[in-house]
Amino acid sequence: MKKIVMKFGGTSVATGENIRHVASLVTQNAKNDCRIAVVVSALAGVTNTLIEIAEQAKKSDEKHIQAFTKELLDKHLATISTAMTSKQVQKEVTQITEKTIAELEKVLTGICYVGELTPKSKDYVLSFGERLSAPIVWGAIKDLKFETQCFTGKEAGIVTDSNFGEADPLMNFTTHLIHERLGPLLEKGVIPVVTGYIAANQDGIVTTVGRGGSDYTATILGVALGVDEVWIWTDVDGIMTTDPKIVPKAKMLPQLSYQEAAEMAIFGAKVMHPRALEPVIKENIPVRIRNVFHPENQGTLITKEPDAKATEVVKAVAMIKDVAMLNVSGAGMVGAPGSYAKVFDVLGKNNINVMMISTAVSEANISMIIRRGLLGRAISNLEIALLDRGGLVSEVSAEDDVAVIAVMGANMKGTLGVASRIFTTVARKGINIRMIAQGSSELNISFVVKEKDGTAVVRAIHEEFNLDKI
Ligand code: ADP
Ligand code: ASP
Ligand code: MG
């Protein structure tokens, strides 16, 4: 009998009707001799509103918080009323929802009184999106007379480090706990419904695994339960040659290797969390990206081997918007052993991940790409640690209106002339390139342009390499 983890994203559970559809997809597969564990995201848009209210709560009043929680409660109650028909199940889910919202109100009021939002309390607030959606999906499956049980990530046994906002699972411990808690249920044909995105550290404090992290939860669960496949159900047909919101003619890629798909996810294809493939690569578990609105399509299959038939040099192009370019310069860095190490040491100690690096031959300058939200922390810490210390670094500057464009494909390796074709295409558009990097894997070439030019660059490259005809 096949075992599958199915993850449903925000749009898949956006409304009560959608949730009913999700429940019927799950139960139809369960009837077809499949053992299924379900992972769910928050209802579409809810995590964003939780971020806003968490930020506002610091300087807000109780009335404002109550208005917010009332609206959130109404939204979920409306969803419950259409997601399931049994009055008894509706009542059960409503009780859980009311209790959860009351807890959220207390948490937000606490933040309001203390006037401070720490990464820890922020994760706690953000956990409520999934804590509210999962019981509704559970209710909809129960409504169809299937045995099911609802878990938070913490209850399921996902234990992470304490890097709030971007926590990583302790995979050995997590595997042990999930296997123990969910394994026997799955064997009996009970359908566990688990909140995506949220987990807990070793002390039981709630953590989140990064935005879009329900995909990561799904693969963690998949590995721990030793499933045959992980299916990521979303609102597009699969992984495409680029974001269909930028190029509507973008084509679905039926097969990708782990390496290609990971490269795409890391370099901006929002369709999957950048770290989601890490757990499954080791265990060689295939991942499928499928359209919840077109379940008749097979979607993109991600496996160890690249598609042997594919001959395209360039397969996809992506844009990462939410980034900034950091420039560290100083004549003192020229020929000084260990000078780069000092810069990266400061960033590393402050939990700032460097996504892209480029240096000039003169060594007087390093340019780096980091998440835009971390820019303030990066500049201030570099300034404290490095400026005026023997003249190693004389200036730390930044540009926060840039985007990274990444052009990808396994066959780019060893193929001459791809870079020149890319840069000629950009030059023809009269657009300036601010920075270039090629990973040693040669699976991608990435470069930085002004954010306002990003869409035009993606479209031009998509056209130049005929990706709509792939
Ligand atoms: P979910 O809520 O299901 O997790 P997301 O919004 O996180 O869905 O991801 C799906 C979206 O990713 C699509 O609607 C699409 O606009 C965007 N996207 C960006 N790049 C790509 C790509 N290369 N292929 C497919 N979708 C992409
Ligand atoms: N709800 C979380 C987010 O919006 C996780 C997810 O959707 O995967 O980031
Ligand atoms: Mg997502």
Image (spheres, rainbow, N blue to C red):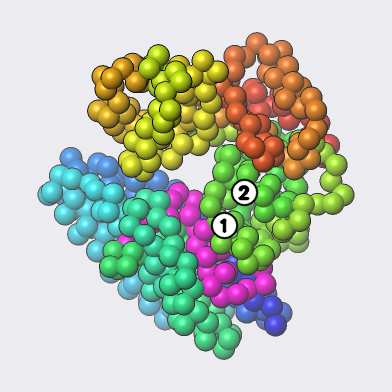
Q: Residue at x 59, y 24 (%)?
A: 436
Q: In the orientation shown, which residue stands out farthest toward the top? A: 430
Query: Mark 1 near mark 2, Cβ–Cβ under 8 Å?
Result: yes
Magenta-colored span: 206-229
The percent position of residue 376, horizontal first and vertical second, equals: 32, 30
Check disc 1 and report the residue beneath it: 278
Whether residue 373 is visible, yes or no, is: no
Q: Is residue 450 left or right of residue 336?
A: right
Q: Is residue 350 magenta?
A: no
Task: State the quadrant of the C terminus.
Answer: top right
Q: In the orientation shown, which residue stands out farthest toward the bottom? A: 188
Q: Residues within 10 Å of mark 2 (few under 14, many from 20)?
A: many
- In the image, residue 325 sits, relative to residue 212, either above or below, namely above
The percent position of residue 300, horizontal first and vertical second, equals: 72, 54
Q: Which element carries disc 1, helix, strand or loop?
A: helix
Q: Which mark is residue 115?
A: none
Is disc 2's CB within 8 Å of ligand 1?
no
Q: Which element carries disc 2, helix, strand or loop?
A: helix
Is disc 1's CB within 8 Å of ligand 2?
no
Between 180 and 378, the one nearer to me in the picture = 378
Between 429 and 25, the one nearer to me in the picture = 429
Q: Residue at x 33, y 64 (%)?
A: 201
Between 173 and 40, the one nearer to me in the picture = 173
Q: What amino acid is found at the position of numbered circle 2 in the picture?
A: Ala
**Upstream in sequence: badge 1 or badge 2:** 2
Check disc 2 and report the residue beneath it: 262
- In the image, residue 157 sits, relative to residue 407, either above or below, namely below
Whether residue 232 is visible, yes or no, is: yes
Task: State the quadrant of the N terminus.
Answer: bottom right
The percent position of residue 296, horizontal first and vertical second, equals: 76, 61
Q: Is residue 210 magenta?
A: yes
